[in-house]
Image: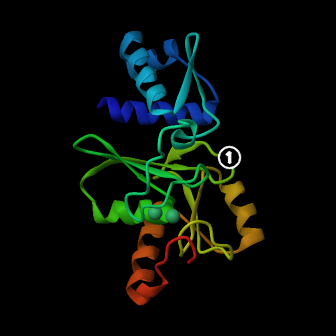
Amino acid sequence: MLPINRQQQIVDILNQEGIVYISDLSRKFNVSEMTIHRDLAHLETEGYLRKVRGGAVPVPQPPSLRSQGAAPESCFMCQMTPRSQTQMTLNLTEGGVKRACCPHCGLHGMQMMSGKIVSALVTDFLRGNIINAQSAIYLVEPDITVCCTPTVLAFQRKDDAARFQAGFGGQLMGMIATLDHLSRAMQINPAKHQHHGK
Ligand SMILES: [Zn+2]
Ligand SMILES: [Zn+2]
Protein backbone atom coordinates (compact mmCIF):
# COMPACT_ATOMS: atom_id res chain seq x y z
CA MET A 1 0.00 0.00 0.00
CA LEU A 2 1.28 3.46 -0.85
CA PRO A 3 2.00 5.71 2.13
CA ILE A 4 -0.53 8.27 0.83
CA ASN A 5 -3.28 5.63 0.76
CA ARG A 6 -2.42 4.48 4.24
CA GLN A 7 -2.37 8.07 5.46
CA GLN A 8 -5.76 8.71 3.88
CA GLN A 9 -7.17 5.66 5.67
CA ILE A 10 -5.64 6.82 8.94
CA VAL A 11 -7.47 10.14 8.56
CA ASP A 12 -10.72 8.24 7.86
CA ILE A 13 -10.28 5.99 10.89
CA LEU A 14 -9.41 8.96 13.05
CA ASN A 15 -12.57 10.78 12.01
CA GLN A 16 -14.68 7.72 12.72
CA GLU A 17 -13.15 6.82 16.04
CA GLY A 18 -12.02 10.18 17.43
CA ILE A 19 -8.57 8.82 18.38
CA VAL A 20 -6.05 6.44 16.85
CA TYR A 21 -3.23 4.48 18.52
CA ILE A 22 0.13 3.80 16.91
CA SER A 23 0.14 0.18 18.14
CA ASP A 24 -3.34 -0.54 16.65
CA LEU A 25 -2.48 1.09 13.31
CA SER A 26 0.80 -0.78 13.06
CA ARG A 27 -1.08 -4.09 13.50
CA LYS A 28 -3.90 -3.07 11.16
CA PHE A 29 -1.62 -2.02 8.28
CA ASN A 30 1.05 -4.59 9.07
CA VAL A 31 3.85 -2.02 9.13
CA SER A 32 6.27 -1.01 11.88
CA GLU A 33 5.30 1.45 14.60
CA MET A 34 8.08 3.67 13.27
CA THR A 35 6.30 3.83 9.89
CA ILE A 36 3.02 4.81 11.55
CA HIS A 37 4.91 7.33 13.64
CA ARG A 38 6.22 8.92 10.42
CA ASP A 39 2.72 8.86 8.85
CA LEU A 40 1.30 10.68 11.85
CA ALA A 41 4.16 13.18 11.85
CA HIS A 42 3.50 13.89 8.17
CA LEU A 43 -0.25 14.24 8.70
CA GLU A 44 0.39 16.55 11.64
CA THR A 45 2.60 18.76 9.47
CA GLU A 46 -0.19 18.88 6.88
CA GLY A 47 -2.60 19.89 9.63
CA TYR A 48 -4.89 16.85 9.56
CA LEU A 49 -4.36 15.72 13.13
CA ARG A 50 -2.50 16.35 16.35
CA LYS A 51 -0.12 13.77 17.77
CA VAL A 52 -0.60 12.72 21.36
CA ARG A 53 1.27 10.15 23.43
CA GLY A 54 1.00 6.84 21.59
CA GLY A 55 -1.39 8.07 18.89
CA ALA A 56 -3.25 11.04 17.44
CA VAL A 57 -6.48 13.03 17.77
CA PRO A 58 -8.33 15.15 15.17
CA VAL A 59 -7.79 18.87 14.91
CA PRO A 60 -10.97 20.95 15.11
CA GLN A 61 -9.93 23.26 12.27
CA PRO A 62 -8.52 22.28 8.91
CA PRO A 63 -5.10 23.50 7.75
CA SER A 64 -5.49 26.86 6.06
CA LEU A 65 -7.05 28.72 8.96
CA ARG A 66 -4.71 27.39 11.58
CA SER A 67 -1.59 28.80 10.02
CA GLN A 68 -2.13 32.35 11.16
CA GLY A 69 0.26 34.86 9.69
CA ALA A 70 1.02 32.75 6.64
CA ALA A 71 -1.04 33.74 3.62
CA PRO A 72 -3.75 31.10 3.17
CA GLU A 73 -3.52 29.26 -0.11
CA SER A 74 -6.19 30.31 -2.59
CA CYS A 75 -8.55 28.02 -4.50
CA PHE A 76 -6.80 26.60 -7.60
CA MET A 77 -10.01 26.99 -9.60
CA CYS A 78 -11.37 30.41 -8.62
CA GLN A 79 -8.62 32.04 -6.46
CA MET A 80 -11.01 32.49 -3.54
CA THR A 81 -9.54 31.88 -0.09
CA PRO A 82 -10.81 28.47 1.06
CA ARG A 83 -13.15 28.57 4.04
CA SER A 84 -12.65 26.27 6.96
CA GLN A 85 -16.11 24.65 6.63
CA THR A 86 -16.06 23.96 2.89
CA GLN A 87 -12.50 23.50 1.68
CA MET A 88 -11.42 20.49 -0.31
CA THR A 89 -7.96 19.12 -1.11
CA LEU A 90 -6.83 16.98 -4.03
CA ASN A 91 -3.70 14.85 -3.70
CA LEU A 92 -1.94 14.53 -7.04
CA THR A 93 -0.22 11.44 -8.40
CA GLU A 94 3.00 13.35 -9.04
CA GLY A 95 2.91 14.60 -5.45
CA GLY A 96 1.65 17.91 -4.20
CA VAL A 97 -1.78 19.11 -3.21
CA LYS A 98 -4.39 21.33 -4.83
CA ARG A 99 -6.67 23.24 -2.52
CA ALA A 100 -10.21 24.22 -3.50
CA CYS A 101 -12.60 26.64 -1.80
CA CYS A 102 -15.53 24.20 -1.77
CA PRO A 103 -16.71 20.89 -3.30
CA HIS A 104 -18.08 22.81 -6.31
CA CYS A 105 -14.58 23.86 -7.36
CA GLY A 106 -12.89 20.74 -5.99
CA LEU A 107 -15.12 18.31 -7.90
CA HIS A 108 -14.76 20.35 -11.10
CA GLY A 109 -11.03 20.25 -10.62
CA MET A 110 -11.19 16.49 -10.14
CA GLN A 111 -12.99 16.13 -13.44
CA MET A 112 -10.53 18.36 -15.25
CA MET A 113 -7.56 16.49 -13.86
CA SER A 114 -8.99 12.99 -13.86
CA GLY A 115 -6.23 10.42 -13.89
CA LYS A 116 -3.87 12.75 -12.04
CA ILE A 117 -5.53 12.48 -8.66
CA VAL A 118 -4.70 9.89 -6.03
CA SER A 119 -7.22 10.90 -3.44
CA ALA A 120 -9.41 13.79 -2.41
CA LEU A 121 -10.51 15.06 0.96
CA VAL A 122 -13.51 17.25 1.71
CA THR A 123 -14.55 19.06 4.87
CA ASP A 124 -17.77 18.09 6.62
CA PHE A 125 -19.87 21.26 6.45
CA LEU A 126 -21.44 20.77 9.88
CA ARG A 127 -18.67 19.21 11.90
CA GLY A 128 -15.60 20.63 10.19
CA ASN A 129 -13.71 17.34 10.12
CA ILE A 130 -11.89 16.08 7.07
CA ILE A 131 -13.34 13.12 5.21
CA ASN A 132 -12.71 11.07 2.11
CA ALA A 133 -14.42 12.72 -0.89
CA GLN A 134 -15.53 9.33 -2.22
CA SER A 135 -17.47 8.37 0.86
CA ALA A 136 -18.96 11.81 1.54
CA ILE A 137 -22.62 12.67 0.93
CA TYR A 138 -23.22 15.85 -1.01
CA LEU A 139 -26.11 18.29 -0.76
CA VAL A 140 -26.39 19.78 -4.25
CA GLU A 141 -28.09 23.10 -4.99
CA PRO A 142 -29.64 23.88 -1.62
CA ASP A 143 -31.73 27.07 -1.34
CA ILE A 144 -28.83 28.93 0.23
CA THR A 145 -25.62 29.89 -1.51
CA VAL A 146 -22.41 28.93 0.26
CA CYS A 147 -19.26 29.84 -1.65
CA CYS A 148 -19.81 28.96 -5.34
CA THR A 149 -23.02 28.19 -7.28
CA PRO A 150 -24.44 25.69 -7.87
CA THR A 151 -23.62 25.23 -4.22
CA VAL A 152 -22.35 21.81 -3.16
CA LEU A 153 -21.89 20.95 0.52
CA ALA A 154 -20.24 17.81 1.88
CA PHE A 155 -21.28 15.73 4.88
CA GLN A 156 -19.86 12.64 6.48
CA ARG A 157 -23.13 11.44 7.98
CA LYS A 158 -26.34 10.83 6.11
CA ASP A 159 -28.48 12.02 9.03
CA ASP A 160 -26.61 15.35 9.17
CA ALA A 161 -27.05 15.78 5.41
CA ALA A 162 -30.75 14.85 5.61
CA ARG A 163 -31.37 17.32 8.41
CA PHE A 164 -29.68 20.05 6.42
CA GLN A 165 -31.70 19.10 3.35
CA ALA A 166 -34.95 19.29 5.36
CA GLY A 167 -34.12 22.89 6.24
CA PHE A 168 -32.53 24.13 3.03
CA GLY A 169 -33.72 21.89 0.20
CA GLY A 170 -31.43 20.55 -2.52
CA GLN A 171 -30.64 16.97 -3.48
CA LEU A 172 -28.49 14.42 -1.67
CA MET A 173 -26.02 12.54 -3.86
CA GLY A 174 -22.89 10.45 -3.76
CA MET A 175 -19.69 11.74 -5.30
CA ILE A 176 -20.15 10.22 -8.77
CA ALA A 177 -23.73 11.48 -9.11
CA THR A 178 -22.63 14.91 -7.93
CA LEU A 179 -19.86 15.01 -10.56
CA ASP A 180 -22.44 14.05 -13.19
CA HIS A 181 -24.90 16.62 -12.01
CA LEU A 182 -22.31 19.40 -12.02
CA SER A 183 -21.06 18.68 -15.51
CA ARG A 184 -24.62 18.48 -16.86
CA ALA A 185 -25.59 21.74 -15.12
CA MET A 186 -22.58 23.43 -16.71
CA GLN A 187 -23.45 22.21 -20.20
CA ILE A 188 -27.08 23.29 -20.01
CA ASN A 189 -26.37 26.69 -18.57
CA PRO A 190 -22.74 27.76 -18.33
CA ALA A 191 -23.76 31.18 -17.02
CA LYS A 192 -25.07 29.47 -13.92
CA HIS A 193 -21.53 28.59 -13.00
CA GLN A 194 -20.64 31.39 -10.65
CA HIS A 195 -18.32 31.83 -7.81
CA HIS A 196 -19.36 33.12 -4.44
CA GLY A 197 -22.91 33.99 -5.56
CA LYS A 198 -21.80 37.12 -7.39
ZN1 LIG B 1 -13.08 27.90 -5.87
ZN1 LIG C 1 -16.28 27.71 -3.82
Q: Nearer the viewer, residue 63 or 110?
A: 63
Ligand 2 within 8 angstroms of badge 1 C-beta: no
Residue at the location (53% across, 45% down)?
A: 131
- 126 relative position to 25: left or right: right
**Mark 1 Cα within 10 Å, few/some/many (few <14, many 20+)?**
some
- 158 relative position to 198: left or right: right
Please provide percent x and percent y for residue 20.
57, 22
State which quarter of the image contains the C terminus.
Answer: bottom right
State which quarter of the image contains the N terminus.
Answer: top left
As drawn, 124 above or below 62: below
Please provide percent x and percent y for residue 139.
60, 66
Q: Nearer the viewer, residue 158 or 55?
A: 55
Residue at the location (57% across, 53% down)?
A: 83
* Residue lying furthest bottom: 188
Which residue is tagged 1?
A: 127
Please provide percent x and percent y for residue 21.
55, 17
Please provide percent x and percent y for residue 143.
68, 77
Residue at the location (49% across, 60% down)?
A: 103
Identify the amino acid type marked 1.
Arg
- The colouring scheme, among rainbow, by chain, secondary structure or one colour, is rainbow
- 120 relative position to 122: left or right: left
Residue at the location (29% across, 31% down)?
A: 2
* Residue lying furthest left: 94
- 15 relative position to 79: left or right: right
Total residue callouts: 1
The kind of secondary structure element at disc 1 is: loop
